[in-house]
Amino acid sequence: MIHALTALVLALPLTASAVHQDSSFRRRHASVAHTPAYMRRAANYTIKDHFVGEDFLSWTFYDSSDPTGGLVTYLDAQSAIDNGLATVDCDNVTTLAVDANQTVATGGNRNSVRISSPETYSSGLFIADFAMMPTGCGTWPAYWTVGTTADWPDAGEIDIIEGVNLNTENQITLHSGADCTLNSTANTTGHILGTECTSSADADSGCAYQQDDTTSFGAGFNAAGGGVYAHLWNSDGITVWFFSRDSIPSDITSQNPDPTTWGTAAAIFPSTGCDISSHFYDHAIVLDTTICGDWAGPAYSASGCPGTCEDAVANSTNFVDAQWKINYISVYQ
Ligand SMILES: *[C@@H]1O[C@H](CO)[C@@H](O)[C@H](O)[C@H]1NC(C)=O
Ligand SMILES: *[C@@H]1O[C@H](CO)[C@@H](O)[C@H](O)[C@H]1NC(C)=O
Ligand SMILES: *[C@@H]1O[C@H](CO)[C@@H](O)[C@H](O)[C@H]1NC(C)=O
Ligand SMILES: *[C@@H]1O[C@H](CO)[C@@H](O)[C@H](O)[C@H]1NC(C)=O
Ligand SMILES: *[C@@H]1O[C@H](CO)[C@@H](O)[C@H](O)[C@H]1NC(C)=O
Ligand SMILES: *[C@@H]1O[C@H](CO)[C@@H](O)[C@H](O)[C@H]1NC(C)=O
């Protein structure tokens, strides 16, 4: 396996500080509509990897303690399958679930899964179609990529879908080594939360956008039938688009994606403030759901959830909708 231990140990360092930024950093960029040069290039992408159905069951199941302090026990592949937390249905939809049946003590650990791709990437056009994503009090799901060959954050981390508890607005975040900032006045559907991508254990908010669209995350995403997150990552920048189920472009469905036709992106991280290639490389794709921990814990009450996050983990009803339902993830280069 390609996965270095560093990537597995560090992970998701986004903390409560990012949540507090939501109000204090909230500012609309009066922006100039412009299309970065790399998006004006003619599209001609070739599918490199297409993950669907059983493919996800052969990804790497991380089964050590959660580095973000979550109240979860991540199961190995066989245990996850035996416990019904990693399943494939007859439509080839892969479900990755948090346990919602077992009795867990207040403040105890609940079973969950965290998987990472066998392949690693240093660029590409990534298209992920989810029918459902985890939501509920105490949950902290993420779809992200992270460097596997250097100590975090030197090979970078790209958080494409991330949020906590009952949130319905997605957060898109980069974490990097030194000398990397978000420098953009481009028109995006998301708004900037913070511009310092350089992260460390003590300052790990990263540079981030929050989407204003309540179908972008959680119950709102699920009510709309899910959707597609696409991101283009190359030496010119990282750009993320979101399409709710009923607005997925036909060129995505037909596997001939052309980002130049996709309209306003949710988030743009241009290379003008950050040398993307030297800060983001050798990434595995990761999907997980943790509970409470460094972000969902401190943000728990503010999100309108009752009691404490330690109480929430003991109430299995909170985890009935704590499920990723993956239609596919494709990588084009
Ligand atoms: C941003 O893009 C949207 C959607 O294309 C458009 O309606 C809006 O006018 C643009 N705003 C600016 C400032 O260019
Ligand atoms: C796309 O790339 C392939 C392989 O390089 C080439 O054969 C094809 O002509 C290209 N298509 C377009 C529309 O540029
Ligand atoms: C279901 O997924 C498997 C890979 O896990 C793939 O080989 C197969 O073609 C898929 N079937 C359909 C109908 O998409
Ligand atoms: C949990 O129990 C319900 C019935 O109460 C069942 O439908 C579901 O498959 C179970 N889930 C798991 C992961 O075992
Ligand atoms: C931000 O990007 C612009 C070009 O869009 C460039 O002129 C400027 O120097 C950059 N600023 C920083 C701090 O990197
Ligand atoms: C358990 O969680 C559900 C869903 O959040 C909530 O409706 C219910 O009141 C909770 N039960 C207890 C005993 O706290």
Image (spheres, grey):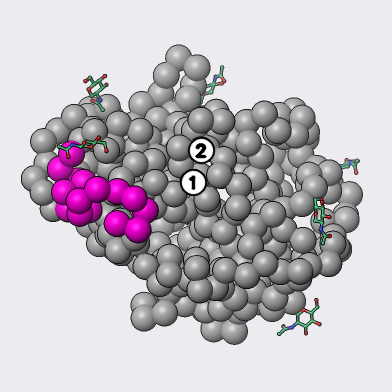
75 left or right, relative to 264: left
Residue type beneath disc 1: Thr
Residue 321: percent from left, percent from top = 35, 33
Q: Secondary structure at mark 2?
A: helix
Identify which residue is drawn at 37% across, 68% down.
16
The earlier-in-sequence mark between 1 and 2 is 1
Between residue 284 and residue 193, name the one nearer to us: 193
Residue at image location 24% in from the left, 33% down from the top: 317
Residue sticking out furthest to the bottom: 179
Query: Residue 148 falls in which quadrant of the image?
Result: bottom left
* Residue 168 tag number: 1
Describe the element under mark 1 as helix, strand or loop: loop
Residue farthest to the left?
105
171 with respect to 303 (left or right) = right
Is 223 magenta? The answer is no
- Above or below residue 99? Residue 153 is below
Label 1 and label 2: CA atoms lie apart by 6 Å
What is the x, y in percent for residue 15?
38, 68
Query: Dominant secondary structure of the magenta stretch?
Result: helix
Task: Characterize the local packing of mark 2: few (<14), some (14-19) or many (20 or more) Cα atoms within 10 angstroms.
Answer: many
Q: Identify the residue position indicated by label 2 in the image.
A: 220
The magenta stretch is 301-315
Q: Is residue 215 above or below residue 92?
A: below
Q: Position of residue 154 (x, y in %)?
A: 49, 75
Confirm or deny contact between disc 1 and disc 2 (CB under 8 A).
yes
